[in-house]
Amino acid sequence: MAATRTPIYQGDDGLERAVIDLVRVGAEGHAAGVRQLASRLMRAVPASVKDADEFRHAVHHALSVARPDTGLRFDGGAIPADAEGSHPLAFVDPLPQADELVLDGRIASELEEIVIERERANELTIAGVPLTRTVLFSGAPGVGKTLTGRWLAWRLGLPLVVLDLAAVVSSYLGSSGRNIKSVLDYAKSGPCVLLLDEFDAVAKRRDDESDIGELKRIVNVILVELDRWPDTSLLVAATNHPQLLDSAIDRRFDRVIEFPMPGQAERESVLRKISNDSIDTDLLAMTAAFWDGGSFSDVVRFWETCRRRAIVRELPLEDVVLHALLERPGSDELRHDLWRLANEEYGFSNRKIASAAGLSHPTVSTGIRRAKGAA
């Protein structure tokens, strides 16, 4: 059993943590991990650094003169590659991080149970209770399944191994099954979290009439491996289309977790994280409300588009977000509240709001009055 990572640093600005992580990853020979940590430091410079720009340049220069990365060594073995040896069948992140994950309470509680199981593995073993070895995530695209797999690896302090679906599913007859088997064997060679994203692509129903036999071989390999999977590693599969999975597949998983679309609270939470609490809470709440029914990826993509537009056009981010929201459809009540917010808090004139929303000036004036009356 791999113990969870226990910080031994006391600083609260991240510098001590980064230094210790760099030493640990470097000592293990994980060149890729060192580069990832360095890139993370450049994105979020610790508060104790006096000159952030100079620090970023210095770290970038150090990376540029380093020797090319020779790849991660995992328990002395090389990452498996295709038959030609030209394409790795998996990616390895030796130091995954996903502290920005936002989920509803039910799923967060179940994930925390998986983490605690590993911390109390001895007690469970003595009691004859097996650890969770395999987990299946299902849900719509963009609801956080892939990030959750990364989060589990981060919390458990384990490397993350991600199956490269494009490289594994070979056009050569019989190769796909062997490719998947080699990745699974690789992930079993030492403690890790193995993520099989887009799982339905390799575990489809075996009654597909268009299949010539290759699909059945792949599914049979997966079924056998799921039954034999060791508790030293955690296998996480994610699918957007659980109805496409073979009927024998989901019974092989210790846990099946369904991810719902995020609610208002979850959408607001992810916006607070990506904006670093630098935007007014009313505007964040309004943005989350306009994305009712949207996924986390929808919300993040909208916000990042606004950030880029604000920089390129040299405009306040709040103005860009408001303009973008004014162009979106919504209920009358929600749009009236947005017009009132833009008018009262951000100084948008009624004509400016009307122009952005594609409506008449009197319509906006009436909507604002109604919103003020409701408030």
Image: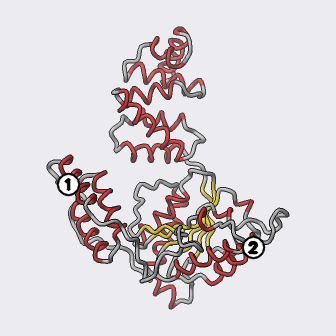
Task: Give residue 367's position: percent from left, percent from top.
Answer: 53, 16
Vertical placement of residue 301 versus 151, above or below: above
**Residue beneath the point at 28% across and 56% down:** 41
**Residue beneath the point at 43% across and 43% down:** 271
Vertical placement of residue 358 versus 203, above or below: above
Q: Quadrant of the N terminus?
A: bottom left
Front position in the image: 62 or 187: 62
**Residue type indicated by callout 1:** Ala
Point out the frontmost of discs 2 and 1. 1
Q: Residue furthest left?
A: 50
Residue 58: mark = 1
Front position in the image: 324 or 291: 324
By what rule are the colours in the image chosen? secondary structure
How far is disc 2 from disc 1 in space, using C-alphas? 54 Å
Q: Residue furthest front?
A: 84
Q: Is residue 167 left or right of residue 2?
A: right
Q: Residues within 10 Å of mark 1 (few under 14, many from 20)?
A: few
Vertical placement of residue 11 versus 134, above or below: above
**Residue beneath the point at 58% across and 78% down:** 182
Q: Residues within 10 Å of mark 2 (few under 14, many from 20)?
A: some
- For mark 2, what is the residue? 248
Q: Residue furthest top?
A: 362
Task: Give residue 63's position: percent from left, percent from top.
Answer: 27, 60
